[in-house]
Amino acid sequence: MEGKLQKTFGRSLRAYRRARGLSQEHFAEIIGVHRTYMGGVERGERNLTLKSVERIAARIEIDALTLLQEPEIAPAAKPAKGRALPRDPEPAS
């Protein structure tokens, strides 16, 4: 299937970002790219080189192979406009 790995990488990156409560814009700053480019990566629209995959993985300190596998966490639902995503409850001390 054409582009399957691109989409998997994008879903993994989005799951990573959302799990940390980061906006796409802030995450793009961390990675060192423009937010519209990051959106294209997350949607699987960008055909990244292996070097780009490695660079992104290094910036967020994760193994590149992990980002090339389906994320274990289901991507969070998009919040309604003006609403924040619900946070996981804090663990009991």
Image (cartoon, helix red, strand yellow):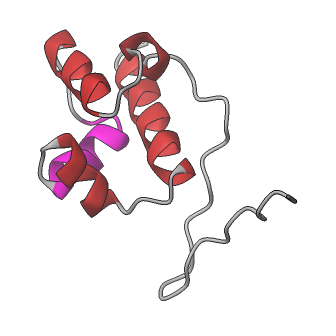
Q: Residue at the spot x=48%, y=17% of the render?
A: 66
Q: Residue at the spot x=33%, y=58% of the render?
A: 24
Magenta residues? 35-45
Q: Which residue lies furthest to the front in this view?
A: 93
The main secondary structure of the magenta stretch is: helix
Depth check, front residue: 68 or 32: 32
Quarter of the figure with residue 9: top left
Estimate the x, y position of residue 14 in percent, counting from the top left: 45, 44
Task: Classify 74 as above or below 93.
Answer: above
Name the quarter where the C terminus is drawn. Answer: bottom right
Depth check, front residue: 88 or 68: 88
Estimate the x, y position of residue 77 in percent, counting from the top left: 62, 61
Estimate the x, y position of residue 92 in percent, counting from the top left: 87, 59
- Asked if the magenta segment contains residue 36, the reply would be yes
Left or right: residue 23 versus residue 26 is right
Task: Classify 29 as above or below 25.
Answer: above
Quarter of the figure with residue 1: top left
Q: Residue furthest bottom?
A: 82
Left or right: residue 48 versus residue 79 is left
Q: Residue at the spot x=52%, y=42% of the render?
A: 15
Estimate the x, y position of residue 50 in percent, counting from the top left: 21, 11
- Asked if the magenta segment contains residue 92, the reply would be no
Q: Residue at the spot x=39%, y=34% of the render?
A: 10
